[in-house]
Structures are given as structure tokens and as C-alpha cells.
Image (cartoon, grey):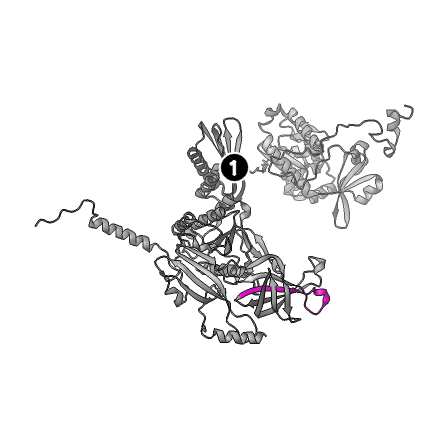
């Protein structure tokens, strides 16, 4: 194995000349699973706009520095830099061109503040479910947790911090945590403390903050600039200053921040509130299995749910019924409403239609109703109910009932589409929409599925209706005709329709049969069509 | 002479009065009839129009597509007139969708007035129609079926009178040459529609279409046959003004077309 270099030899090489891991014979790295991410229990779907975390990249292994830049005006500014980049002297706030000039081998990414905010919000929601009831996003890069009385559940503050860091590391994030008596002190120590975990004993905020820079106090940019002019750069410099002149020079907000950090003024955290799906549950004393008893329990559950929805001002679009059977199986049944509803009778009727799909087995011991999809629904005024019958009645209950009977695709309306070609002028829309009509050109009541060719057509060119034709092996003599109605092909849909023309005629034959026929081509120009005739519909 | 003893099984006067009141009430619950606005039809119908709470059946005179389209438009025109008061919706239940909505709009049944319900088979179509009837929020229900027996039509008739919604049942041809109206039914009226030659215009062109409208059966009334002009934009039929002159005009039209 003469060609194999030793470890010290490899480390002496510059970064770009080192052999790859595979060349060195290590097939498997302890890399994170690429699809592992937050569990999807915090109301955010998996396809969130957030970037997928990159737990352990080759760039990390090889020490390639990465910076994130954002464009502000004409200038590109570094907004964040990785650890290696920081070691190399790159700092947030530098011009991107400067950073590129300093470090040649630099990975540059665009900043995505929206995605960062989404990630932070998601993490806050996760924290509010798992660790503490009060969690909030603080600034563009931090989270606040109110840990009062919660850390003992995780083995103490120290242990909680380590678990939290591990959790974030699994997600691919570097973090530093500070636990302090005030949100302001925690904010300052977490960002400027310099160690991953800082746990501050209560009452020592002023001493701990003293050596930190003024920026740790969340001051405004103008106050920071003024303080720099006065030569104030540590928080300790502010302590001996008289408060009145300080407030006049640096603004009242500065004094307030200082007092908040030292715990002299309260600073409440506005927590994020995770949305909880309305859910009602009934556990049964004895297992039930008869349709009557199941109907009764469903009815009770729906009554409970209506109360809950009314309290929260919601209307249900989808209601799922879950039945826990004695043998451990779980049955579920869902009904959807075409419009947000809080009508108990309507929900009960929709469940009654689906009742036959329940298999109680040996018995059902618990039933619950969950509303996975709800919408805000305010109270409706009584005046709407006692108004005269001039208003059209609401169709939503009927639509739900019919959809429950025949499936969601069975019910539709036909709306107009902006096209002159007859078969393209219609489209199916939702049953509760209000579609628009068509222009008043004469149209048949029923259209053939596709135009059928006519034979033995005798017609005067270019623009007379046919005099006779054969369709479906039957001869027709035309006694009257209207037309042509010329419809041009839609070249923006298909290139073959660039020159295509259809001339539609309405004809009446002997015996009073009225047809809608067309000829391909305008009868003058060859590219418009081959002058064949087609039947497209019948008039009444 | 002693007065005859009252027979025990004979109903008393009060009972009879209450029965009569019941009967008159149930007769009166028949909703308002929708008049055609044509005296020749309205005078011959028992209700002077179509009962707003009953089942009415329609069928094409032949299995041809033209008669089929005429029947569709005839029913759609009636539905449009039912829907026009109050701006309510018509449910059109069918199993095979080949309607062309722009054509229906031209007899007054705009796209915002029709709700289509497509079932997989006739039984499902009838069930959806019955749901729509009992709901009571619709102006009218139209169902297209190929087969509906006495039980099905009686159910529809009961649902229509319960929900106070008119039911128009369009019975399509199953086998060529056999009229679908030959089977028994509980319908209030049964109509058979066919195409007829339109009146000739003094210039080249197709005149207002005409239909031969045949009332095959009505409850407590006589059948009749009429030739009528087709529905206009509000779904109203018209009685042709010049029936007597048709032969002459037709000859002239043929001469013009030739």
C-alpha cells in the first residue's frame, strides 16, 4: 500500500488537493438521513417553503467557507457567514465583493429571509407543543422560551439545553442558548456570550451583561451610532450614566431596553399560539354496535362539536369521525361540506348517509369527531332568516347530500370558457359557483361527442348550406338553411389550426328535422380546410 | 212507525265532514299550477297548467336525435319558467352527459340556473332526483332515465308533493320503435314531443322551429295533440298563427330554396 498517504500527509495538503473520502476507503460516513426533518405535527405541511436542512455537507468536511448575501440597493451585503468564514475574517455586514476578494474559494448563497422566518415560526410552534407553553420568535434569528416551571420535566436546565442543542444539530442548525431571568439578558447572552450554553443565576443580569457590546441590547441603529460617537461601546459604560441625559442623548427606548435587560421593567413575551383542531370525544361505558346506538352517539358528538365550533367562531368544511373498536382497530369516516357549516342537523344527516360504511365488529368503545378543515364562520343575522322568500334558498345542504350519495365528481355546473370552438366553449365548475353565459349564437341542445362526417353532400360554394346529404346511412333533402357562421381555428392551442376554418350552417330537412352541420374550409382558400362536411349537433 | 236505528258501521255526520275537510285540504295542497300562457293548452289541462307539486313525464315521439333534442328543449323551457320566479336552481340528473349548455341557455335556462348531477345508472339518478325533490330548495328537478317502473314513479310523485317541487321525468328511448310511455306510471301528465316543419320565411332561412306536442295522458282529463312553436329565450311556447296557410308557404319555400 505504498500509494496510500498517511493522515498527517493528507492534513498537510491544501484543501482542494486532499483525496475524497471514497478514495481514502471510507465508504460510509455518519451522515444524516437527507429526508429527516421536523415531524409534521405542527400544522405545517412537509412541502413548506423552508429550505431543507443540510446536516453535514462536503463543504463542512472540506472546510469550504460559505456566506449568505442579500442585495440592498446597489450593494450586495453579507448577512450571515459560516464558522469557517468567520474564522477567515468575514463578518456579516461586509460587502460581498470584499468578502470574495478576501477569500477566493467561497461558497455564496442568496439570503431567503422569508424561509428563515417560516423555519423559526415552525420551530416556535414545535416548542409550544413539546417544551413550553410560551414560545415566541425573537428577532430574525432567535427564539424565546419561557421556561418557568418546565425544565424539570427534561432533567433540569443544563440537560434541557443539551437536548435542545442536539435536537437542533440533528436538524442541521448551530445554536447557542442562554437562560436568564429576563428576556433581554437571555437575548444578549445567547448572541454575544460566546459559549453554546449560558445559564445565568437569577439576579446577576447586570454583572453578566456588563462586558457585552451595546448591540446586545437590541438598540436602534441611530442610538448605536450616537453611542459610538460618544465612545460608549460596552453595556457597563451605561450603568454609571445619569438616566435623564442618557434618555435625551440615546432616546428613551435605550433606557427602557437597559431596564428590561436588568429586570427593572417587565417585558412580556407574546407567544405563538398553535391552532388546535376542534375535537370532541365520547368514551362509552359499554361497547356499542347497533346502528341506533351509533346514531345516538354521533348525534351527541355533533351537538358537542357545534357548541365548540360556536365558541371558537368556526365552521366545519370537513368532519372526520373516528371509532375505536374493542379489538383495537380504528374505523374512520369523513364527510365534507361544500361551505363552512355549523348546522348540526345537516352534519347528522350527512353522517346518517354514510352510516352503512361503519363496521362495528365486536363493538365500539370510543368515538371522536375531529375537524381537520375549518373556516372562520361568524354568526348570521336573524333578519336573513325571516326575510321574505325572494332570496334564493341555500343549496349547500343539498349539494353535500348529493355529493355524499354519489361522490364529489357527480355534481357540477357548466360554465363558459373563452373560445368560439363549440366543443371548447364549456367547462365543468364547482356546484356552488355562479357561472357566466354564452353569446346568443344559435346552438343545439345536444352536441355529438365528436363531429360525424356527412357523405354525398351537394352544396353551392362558397357560402351556401348543403342541398342534400347522407348521414348515418340516411339521405336528407334540405329545404331551408341559415349560415354560414364562420369559426376560425385557435392557432395558440394547436399549430395545425393556424389557417383552419369551420363554416357552420343550420339546416332544416324535409320532415322538420333541424341539424347543425359544418364544412371545413371557407371554400376559397385551400389551406383553410378540405371542404368536407360534418354533422355536429341537432336542434329541437 | 219507529225511526230506523242508526247503523253502527255507517260514519256519522262529523266523521264525514272531517273526511271531506281532509280531502279538500289534500286536494288544495296541490301547488300552484304553471300555466303555459296558451289558451289552447291551458283550457284542455285539468289544472289549467302544470301542477307545481307533481310528476310530469316526457318522451320523444321517435328515437331520432331530433325528437330527443326537441323533448329536451321542451322540458328545459318548462324548467326555465319554473325557475324564473325567485331565481332558483334546477337540478338536472342524468347518467350520460351529452347536453350542450349554450343551447339550454337559449330557452332561458342559464348556466347559473342549472346544477347537473351525473349518476352511474338509472337507480342512482332517480335517488338523486328524489333527494333534490325532498330538499325543497329547488325550482324544479329534471331526470333523464331509460327505465322507471310504477314504484319509481310513485316514489317520485310522493317526493314531489312532499317537497312541493315539480318533477320532470324525461324517459329516453330504450328500444327502437317502442314508446317509453307505454309502461304504467304515476305521473300527473305524460307528454310526447316530436319535430315538425317550421313555418317558411319569406326569405331564405330557417324559421322558428315547431313541435308536435301530444299530451298522452293526464289525470282526470283528456289527451290532445297540438302543433306549437318552440320555446323562445324565456322558455315560452307559442301557438302558430297561420296553420292554414302552411302548405302554400311550404311550396313557395321549396321553390325559393331551389
User: Can the viewer see residue A525?
Assistant: yes
Point out the stretch of residues depicted in magenta. A513-531
Q: Position of residue B236 (x, y in %)?
A: 46, 65
Question: In which chain is the residue bearing label 1?
Answer: A
Q: How many marks?
A: 1
The part of the image, by quadrant, that contains residue A349 is: top left
Nearer to me, A521 or A410: A521
Residue A520 is left or right of residue B114, and the answer is right
Nearer to me, B163 or A536: A536
Q: Position of residue A125 (x, y in %)?
A: 61, 36
Nearer to me, A39 or A489: A489
Nearer to me, A438 or A211: A438
User: At 77% across and 50% down in the image, what residue appears?
Assistant: A74
Q: Position of residue A115 (x, y in %)?
A: 68, 41
Is residue A519 magenta-colored? yes
The part of the image, by quadrant, that contains residue B44 is: bottom left
Residue at the far right: name it: A2
Q: Position of residue A347 (x, y in %)?
A: 47, 42
Q: Which residue is mark 1?
A: A333
Above or below: residue A90 compared with residue B191: above
Amino acid at each position: 500500500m505504498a500509494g496510500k498517504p498517511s493522515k498527517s500527509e493528507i492534513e498537510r495538503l491544501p484543501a482542494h488537493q486532499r483525496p475524497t473520502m471514497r478514495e481514502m476507503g471510507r465508504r460510509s460516513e455518519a451522515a444524516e438521513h437527507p429526508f429527516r426533518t421536523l415531524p409534521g405535527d405542527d400544522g405545517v405541511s412537509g412541502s413548506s417553503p423552508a429550505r431543507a436542512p443540510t446536516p453535514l455537507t462536503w463543504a463542512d468536511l472540506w472546510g469550504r467557507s460559505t456566506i449568505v448575501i442579500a442585495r440592498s440597493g446597489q450593494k450586495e451585503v453579507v448577512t450571515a457567514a459560516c464558522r469557517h468564514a468567520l474564522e477567515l475574517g468575514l463578518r456579516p455586514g461586509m460587502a460581498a465583493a470584499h468578502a470574495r476578494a478576501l477569500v477566493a474559494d467561497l461558497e455564496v448563497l442568496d439570503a431567503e429571509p422569508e424561509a428563515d422566518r417560516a423555519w423559526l415560526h415552525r420551530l416556535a410552534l414545535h416548542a409550544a407543543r413539546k417544551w413550553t407553553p410560551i414560545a415566541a420568535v425573537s428577532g430574525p434569528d432567535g427564539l424565546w422560551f419561557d421556561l418557568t416551571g418546565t425544565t424539570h420535566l427534561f432533567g433540569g436546565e443544563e440537560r434541557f439545553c443539551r437536548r435542545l442543542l442536539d435536537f437542533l444539530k440533528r436538524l442541521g442548525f448551530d445554536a447557542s442558548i442562554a437562560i436568564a431571568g429576563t428576556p433581554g439578558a437571555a437575548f444578549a447572552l445567547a448572541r454575544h456570550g460566546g459559549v453554546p450554553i449560558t445559564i445565568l443565576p437569577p439576579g446577576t443580569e447586570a454583572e453578566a451583561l456588563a462586558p457585552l457590546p451595546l448591540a446586545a441590547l437590541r438598540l436602534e441603529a441611530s442610538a448605536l451610532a450616537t453611542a459610538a460617537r460618544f465612545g460608549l461601546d460596552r453595556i457597563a459604560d451605561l450603568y454609571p450614566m445619569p438616566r435623564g441625559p442618557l434618555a435625551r442623548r440615546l432616546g428613551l427606548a435605550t433606557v427602557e431596553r437597559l431596564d428590561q435587560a436588568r429586570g427593572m421593567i417587565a417585558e412580556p413575551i407574546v407567544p405563538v399560539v398553535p391552532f388546535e383542531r376542534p375535537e370532541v370525544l365520547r368514551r362509552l361505558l359499554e361497547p356499542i354496535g347497533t346502528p341506533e346506538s351509533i346514531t345516538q352517539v354521533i348525534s351527541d358528538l355533533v351537538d358537542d362539536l357545534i357548541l365548540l365550533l360556536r365558541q371558537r367562531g368556526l365552521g366545519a368544511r370537513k368532519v372526520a369521525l373516528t371509532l375505536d373498536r374493542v379489538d383495537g382497530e380504528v374505523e374512520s369516516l369523513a364527510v365534507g361540506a361544500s361551505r363552512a357549516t355549523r348546522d348540526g342537523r345537516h352534519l347528522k344527516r350527512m353522517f346518517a348517509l354514510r352510516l352503512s360504511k361503519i363496521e362495528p365488529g365486536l363493538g365500539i368503545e370510543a368515538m371522536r369527531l375531529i375537524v381537520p378543515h375549518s373556516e372562520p364562520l361568524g354568526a348570521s343575522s336573524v333578519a336573513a332568516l325571516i326575510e321574505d322568500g325572494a332570496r334564493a334558498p341555500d343549496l349547500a345542504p343539498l349539494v353535500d347530500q348529493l355529493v355524499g350519495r354519489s361522490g364529489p365528481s357527480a355534481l357540477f355546473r357548466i360554465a363558459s370558457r373563452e373560445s368560439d370552438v363549440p366543443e371548447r366553449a364549456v367547462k365543468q365548475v364547482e356546484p356552488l359557483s355562479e357561472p357566466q353565459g354564452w353569446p346568443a349564437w344559435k346552438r343545439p341542445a345536444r352536441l355529438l361527442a365528436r363531429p360525424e362526417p356527412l357523405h354525398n353532400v351537394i352544396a353551392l360554394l362558397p357560402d351556401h348550406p348543403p342541398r342534400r346529404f347522407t348521414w348515418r346511412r340516411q339521405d336528407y333533402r334540405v329545404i331551408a338553411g341559415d349560415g354560414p357562421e364562420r369559426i376560425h381555428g385557435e392557432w395558440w392551442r394547436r399549430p395545425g389550426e393556424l389557417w383552419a376554418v369551420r363554416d357552420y350552417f343550420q339546416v332544416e330537412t324535409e320532415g322538420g328535422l333541424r341539424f347543425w352541420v359544418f364544412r371545413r374550409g371557407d371554400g376559397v382558400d385551400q389551406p383553410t380546410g378540405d371542404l368536407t362536411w360534418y354533422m355536429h349537433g341537432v336542434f329541437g | 212507525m219507529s225511526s230506523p236505528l242508526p247503523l253502527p258501521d255507517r260514519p256519522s255526520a262529523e266523521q264525514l265532514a272531517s273526511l271531506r275537510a281532509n280531502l279538500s285540504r289534500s286536494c288544495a295542497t296541490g301547488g300552484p299550477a304553471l300555466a303555459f300562457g296558451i289558451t289552447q293548452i291551458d283550457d284542455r289541462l285539468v289544472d289549467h297548467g302544470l301542477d307545481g307539486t307533481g310528476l310530469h313525464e316526457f318522451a320523444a315521439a321517435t328515437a331520432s336525435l331530433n325528437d330527443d333534442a326537441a323533448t329536451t328543449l321542451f322540458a328545459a323551457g318548462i324548467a326555465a319558467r319554473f325557475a324564473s320566479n325567485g331565481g332558483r336552481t334546477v337540478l338536472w340528473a342524468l347518467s350520460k352527459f351529452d347536453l350542450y349548455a349554450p343551447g339550454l341557455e337559449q330557452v332561458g335556462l342559464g348556466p347559473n340556473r342549472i346544477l347537473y348531477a351525473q349518476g352511474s345508472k338509472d337507480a342512482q339518478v332517480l335517488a338523486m332526483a328524489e333527494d333534490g325533490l325532498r330538499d325543497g330548495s329547488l325550482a324544479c328537478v329534471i331526470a333523464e332515465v331509460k327505465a322507471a317502473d310504477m314504484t319509481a314513479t310513485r316514489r317520485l310523485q310522493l317526493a314531489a308533493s312532499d317537497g312541493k317541487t315539480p318533477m320532470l321525468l324525461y324517459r329516453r328511448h330504450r328500444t327502437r320503435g317502442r314508446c317509453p310511455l307505454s309502461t304504467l306510471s304515476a305521473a300527473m301528465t305524460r307528454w310526447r314531443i316530436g319535430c315538425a316543419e317550421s313555418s317558411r320565411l319569406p326569405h331564405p332561412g330557417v324559421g322558428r322551429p315547431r313541435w308536435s306536442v301530444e299530451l298522452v295522458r293526464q289525470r282526470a282529463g283528456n289527451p290532445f295533440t297540438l302543433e306549437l312553436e318552440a320555446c323562445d329565450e324565456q322558455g315560452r311556447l307559442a301557438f302558430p298563427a297561420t296553420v292554414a296557410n302552411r302548405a302554400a308557404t311550404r311550396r313557395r319555400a321549396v321553390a325559393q330554396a331551389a
